[in-house]
Image (cartoon, rainbow, N blue to C red):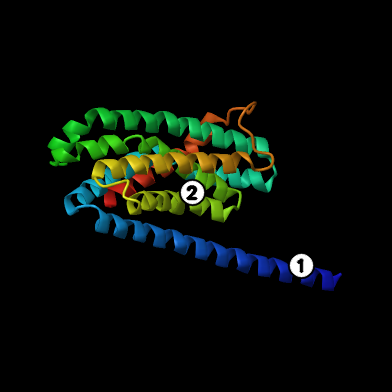
Amino acid sequence: MLTTIQTKLTNNRKGLLFQSALAFTIRAFGAASGFLLNLIIARTLPPQQAGYYFLAFTVIQVLAITGLLGLQTSLLRFIGSSKAEKNWNEASAAHKTGTLWAYLLATSLGVLLYVTSPWLAEHILEKPDATPALQAMSPSVVLFALLTLNAHALQALGDVIKSVSTLNILVQLLLAAALLMGLATTAQTTAAFYSLACLLTMLISLIWWLRKPGIKWCAVKQFPAATLWQSCLPLWWVALMGLGVQ
């Protein structure tokens, strides 16, 4: 019996080391892909167009994080605990409810950005020529918010590779391919391809989530709204204060 226990502990330790090394490698690759994408944009686009793209990208990140309502961390908590209890109905319900909430708020912010882009670019950012880039990237407010939720849901299930690929790798690789192929030559076309890359990544991550054993979308009860709101509200304020610091 002692030999069996020792063998299991050794195997668990090796498994933990392997998972840690794998997670580190994937996250390092994700950070490198983000750096390489910025380098490709700087090398491919004219300086002024690259500046418009990065300006629009910053606006999108702010709105997407605002639209998430802090739900990404709440889903990480609730789905992770549901996985430990093998309560897949609760995990599915938490993901579905969080997705619907983020979709409604982030979509509203994306539409608002598209409508107010001319005014925002001229009076707030003082860059009227950035309007096309802002409008082309406005769909990615909701798309980036949803793929971020999917990434955290996959992380809660322990799928590090798919989680990091969703959040830090796929979008960068798809956009870099468009730039290197000469399909994106201005801030507007680059922003449009970024939105397309977010759409494809969001769909891929959603498929990954729904293919997990026990996970489903239809015939799932609503997760308790009060419980989810009490969890995500403080996290939302923390995220907004983090944006303020940046």
Kindly identify the amino acid type of the residue bearing the numbered disc 2. Answer: Thr
Res. 66 in view: no
Q: How many labels, in total?
A: 2
Q: Decide which of 78, 55 is in the foreground and name it.
A: 55
Q: Is residue 11 left or right of 224 when viewed as pictured?
A: right
Pointers 2 and 1 in contact (C-beta within 8 Å): no
Label 2 neighbour load within 10 Å: few <14, some 14-19, many 20+: many
Q: Which residue is disc 1 drawn over?
A: 8
Label 1 neighbour load within 10 Å: few <14, some 14-19, many 20+: few
Q: Residue at x 52, y 42 (%)?
A: 204
What percent of the width, then of the height, locates residue 16? 63, 65
Kindly identify the amino acid type of the residue bearing the numbered disc 1. Answer: Lys
Which numbered tag is attached to residue 166? 2
Quadrant location, the N terminus: bottom right
- Image height of 171 relative to 9, above or below: above
Q: Residue at x 65, y 38 (%)?
A: 215
The Cα–Cα distance between marks 2 and 1, rounded to whole angstroms, is 33 Å
Q: Residue at x 47, y 61 (%)?
A: 27
Res. 225 in view: yes
Q: Helix, strand, or loop for circle 2?
A: helix
Query: Which badge, 2 or 1, is on the more N-terminal residue?
Result: 1
Q: Helix, strand, or loop for circle 1?
A: helix
What percent of the width, then of the height, locates residue 94? 57, 36
Q: Decide which of 43, 130 is in the foreground and name it.
A: 43
Q: Residue at x 42, y 38 (%)?
A: 143
Mark 2 or 1: in front is 2
